[in-house]
Amino acid sequence: MADNEESNKTSLRASVEEGETRVALGRPEPSLPVADTAYATQFTQYSAPHNHSTGFAQARELVKQSQSGKGRLLKKRFLLEDVLGHGGMGTVYKTKDLRKVEAEDPNPYIATKILNQDFKDHPDAFVTLQQETAKSQTLAHPNIVTVHDFDREGDTLFMTMELLEGQPLDQLIKAQRSKGLPKEQVWQIAKDLCAALAYAHQRQLIHADFKPGNVFVNTDGSAKVLDFGIARAASKEAQKHKFDAGQLGALTPAYATIEMVKDEPLGFSDDVYALACVIYEMLAGRHPYNNRSALEAYQQKLVPKRLDKLSAREWKALSHALALTKAERTASITQFVDELFPRRNPLMLTAAVGMALVSLAGAAWFGFSQHQAQQKVQATIAEKITQAQSCFATQDFACAIEQSLVATNLAPDNSVARQLLLAAQQAQEQRLQDDKIGELIGEAQRCLLQQDLECAAVYLQKAEAVGVHNSQVVSFHEALSVARAQQAQSATQKQAEIDDALARANSCFTARDYTCTVNSVDRILALDPAHAEAIALKQKIASAKEQEGALAGKVSRLMVDAENCMAKKNYSCAIAKAESVLELDAGYQPATTLKSRAQETQRKLKETGFTIK
């Protein structure tokens, strides 16, 4: 803002509502509002394919600064700097467009309106913002502020527009409150305002909130009308949306007609009345009805004070437009212009050539002004097409759409603008499609890395729904097919290993080789932790070991008894105990040996005649 002080200029505090536009001379607001918590940390590393440029380096540095708290970054592109003004709908910021910075544009600044919390909480807030943008874009005119686009980041709704240099009209009037502005300056501003409103009315749009706070006077003396946010369609047929943004706008009573105060259907004369009030205020430094609404002025029978600086004809024209009742008021901007700046009768030229030339010059101002406006429009069209082509070449399709849309609105039959708009929209749509597919394929790849092929297939299916022939989709489809084939082969090999280990485990179990059985079962469970047969076999091993331990204890006790019997030479007892052991374990060799020894001893004793007890 320092340059503004040096040049004694002020920056546009932008298109804000309720006449609250303000200008601070080189004195920005203390700080920007804190970003929504959910988005405060979502700054992304600035990147671009042509990252070797000086502009790119500057843009990247600005992103780094925003991360350290110097401004807030929206959509990785718009860096909010100074607060320019506050209004009923939101706050306007001086904004640096990083796309322009990267392109090394000498003037990278725009204005950004961010809807305030109360307004954006309205369920139709985003629709309203879209409507304001759409209305403004259809009103591409040298005397109407240019609106670029609307967007959102999370729950932050915003609109971008051109940044102007100069001062709001309400500030100029306030500075000359005692005597008003010079008549020549008033007529210059009035001509621009008439041209702007006439242009809007031709397109069936009524401003509905015209006032000094919604007029901006540029440093070159030209004027621009701001804030068509609550502009209304002049007829139901011209209303493109069911929702009327004007329902959310705040009425400015001092410039409202009786019909507006009573919420009756609007007409073009409502803007005529507001314009007449503004012109009177510029001339006198005060409102014609002391800031009363038309209804109050009518009820109090107020009459505007005659302005001495106006001729009788000029005062009659202005008074006609200031009439409080619709029936008595000037009906249209065109009629108002004809009455305030009438075209002289050509027959009068015969009376005085010199006077006639002067009169003609004054009377022809509106036609000439319209001619100049048309030339400006053609220049604007050419400029917007050039900018759109440049943006398209750098693949900044959003920018290309913005610029070509303005050109198309100005000249619907311009084939270059239409083709550019269509190409940029298609390219933007393709980019969005590619980005969406990229996100889905990225998720699918993460699933693939985790060997979750079903998950990968779900994301692939979603990506195919967006663009089945997309190269990323085709490539991943092949990768998933390979993964499925590998998984099937791996599953076959694993099943073969499981079958082999299970056969060995059963064989070992039959042979009561429990160590071998356990090793084989563990191998199966390592491959398939839920393998039912392996789990059952492991339980059988535990049961068999338990039974085996009990049997071993019983055999041991019987063998002790058998040995005791042998020691007492009770061979029949020893034989009986050994046979009991063999009944428990037929292959127990110590029992077989003890039985044979007892039988042999018993036989020899019988042969020698000993009596065996």
Image (spheres, rainbow, N blue to C red):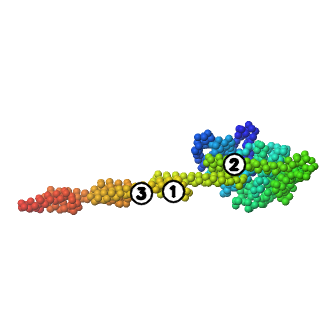
Alpha carbons under labels 2 and 1: distance apart? 41 Å
Residue 513 percent across, percent down from the top left? 28, 56
Residue that mark 3 sits on: 488
Residue that mark 2 sits on: 384
Q: Is residue 282 left or right of residue 416?
A: right
Q: Is residue 196 left or right of residue 403?
A: right
Alpha carbons under labels 3 and 1: distance apart? 19 Å
Q: Of label 2 and label 1, which has the lower sequence position?
A: 2
Name the kind of residue labelled 1 in the image. Answer: Leu
Mark 3, Cα crowd under 10 Å, few <14 / some 14-19 / many 20+, is few
Q: Of label 3 and label 1, which has the lower sequence position?
A: 1
Q: Is the C-beta separation of discs 3 and 1 under 8 Å?
A: no
Residue that mark 1 sits on: 460
Say above or below: 243 vs 66. below
Q: Is residue 607 left or right of residue 247?
A: left
Q: Nearer the viewer, residue 165 or 339?
A: 339
Query: What label does residue 549 carry, if any?
Result: none
Residue 448 percent across, percent down from the top left? 47, 53
Q: Residue at left 49%, top 57%?
A: 457
Task: Name the quarter where the C terminus is drawn.
Answer: bottom left
